[in-house]
Image (cartoon, rainbow, N blue to C red):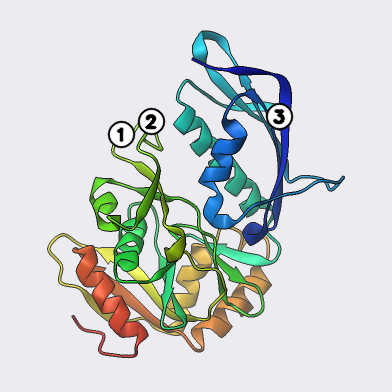
Amino acid sequence: MITRVKTTRLHRLFVPAIDTLIELRSTVAGVVPGMRRVLANMQPRARSGRARPGCVLRVEPGRAGAMILNRDDEEVLRTTDPAYLLAGIEYELFGVAVRRARKHLLLHAGAAARHGRGVLLPGGPDAGKSTLVAALLGRGFRYFTDENAALSLGTGKLTPLPRPLHLDDRSWELLRPRRTVITRHPYHPSDATRRYARPAARLVARQPVPVGLVAFLRRQPGARARAEPVRPARALAGLMRLGFNSDRMPRAAFETLADLLGTARAVRLHFDAPGDAACLIDRLLRGESSSG
C-alpha cells in the first residue's frame, strides 16, 4: 500500500563523485530516505540554493498502487515495487551523470584497487565485470565501481564511483559476509536473479589512485585464469570504444588514455572461476607473472 504525503518532499542532492545535482520531488513516503540508503557509499550531500539541477525527478502515486517516476516531466517508469522504483531513480541519476560529465572520462568497466594502484576491468554486458569485482572485494580490494569507471581527465587517476553492485546469484555469494544488503528484489524485472547490494563502507575507496593494470575480460567456460599482453595501441582503441562519453571529448579522452597506458600494464584476462582470476589480478598488480 502506498502512503501519500500531503506536501511534496523536495530534496536537492549533490553527488560529489559525479559532480551532479539532482532534484528529487516525491509525494510518496519513503522515497527520499530510500535514496539516501542507496547512495550512502557515494556520500551525497543535501544542497540548498538556486543552482540548476542536472535533472528533476518526480515521484507520484498512480492507479492500482502504482508509483510513477518522471524525469523532467516525462514518465520513465511505472511500478508497484518500491525496490524497483529506487533502482530506477538510481539508473536515471547515473544517466544524467554520463550525459553531463565534463571532468571525467567514463568507461564501461569495473574497477577496484589494492597496493595503492587501481585495476580497470573493461568489458561489455555479461563480460563478468560485477562478478570479478565481487571476487576482488573478497581478497581485500577496495571498491570503485562495477560498471562505470571514472578517470579524471588530465591525470588519468581512477576516481571512486561506488554505485550499488548489480549481482547475479553466483556473484552474490562472493560478497558474503562483506556485503550490506539494500534489497533482494530484482534490479531488472526480466531477470529475477539480479541482486542490488551495497558493499560495506570499509570496502569502499575514498581517494583517487593511479591505474596500474588494465585487464580486458574474456570469460570462457573451463578456462584456466591466464593473462596475455595487449599492445598499447590496441588497448587504447579498445578503451575508446568502451567510453560512455569519449565521443563528446575525443581529444581529451585519447590523451588521458594514452598517458595512462604509458605506465599501466594492459592484458587480456581469460578466466572462468572469478576467485582464480582475482588471485591472478592481485599478482599482476604486484608485478608478478602473467600466467596462472
Real-space CA distance between mark 2 and mark 3, rounded to the nearest whole angstrom: 27 Å
Q: Label 2 is placed on what type of residue? A: Pro
Q: Residues within 10 Å of mark 2 (few under 14, many from 20)?
A: few
The picture places residue 155, in percent across and down from the top left corner, at: 63, 80
**Residue 289 visible within the image:** yes
Q: Residue at x 46, y 82 (%)?
A: 116
Q: Describe residue 128's horizontal placement relative to residue 208 as left or right.
A: left
Which element is circle 3 on?
strand
* Residue located 28% across and 71% down the image: 278
Which of the image's four quarters has the C terminus?
A: bottom left
Q: Give the residue type at disc 1.
A: Ala
Q: Which residue is mark 1?
A: 192
| Classed neighbour count for the residue bearing mark 1: other residues with Cα under 10 Å, few (<14), some (14–19), many (≥20) | few
- Quarter residue 129 falls in: bottom left
**158 shown above or below 165:** below
Q: Residue furthest left?
A: 222
Cα distance in 3D space between marks 3 and 1: 31 Å
Label for residue 9?
Answer: 3
Whether residue 7 is situated above or below residue 158 in the rendered picture: above
Q: Which residue is mark 2?
A: 189
Of residue 3 and residue 270, the one placed in the foreground of this image is 3
Question: Looking at the picture, how far across and down is residue 130, in whole percent?
Answer: 36, 56
Residue 240 tag number: none
Looking at the image, tell me whether mark 2 or mark 3 is earlier in sequence order: 3
> Do labels 2 and 1 touch, CB within 8 Å?
yes
Q: Amino acid at mark 3?
A: Arg
Compared to residue 63, the image places residue 278 above or below, namely below
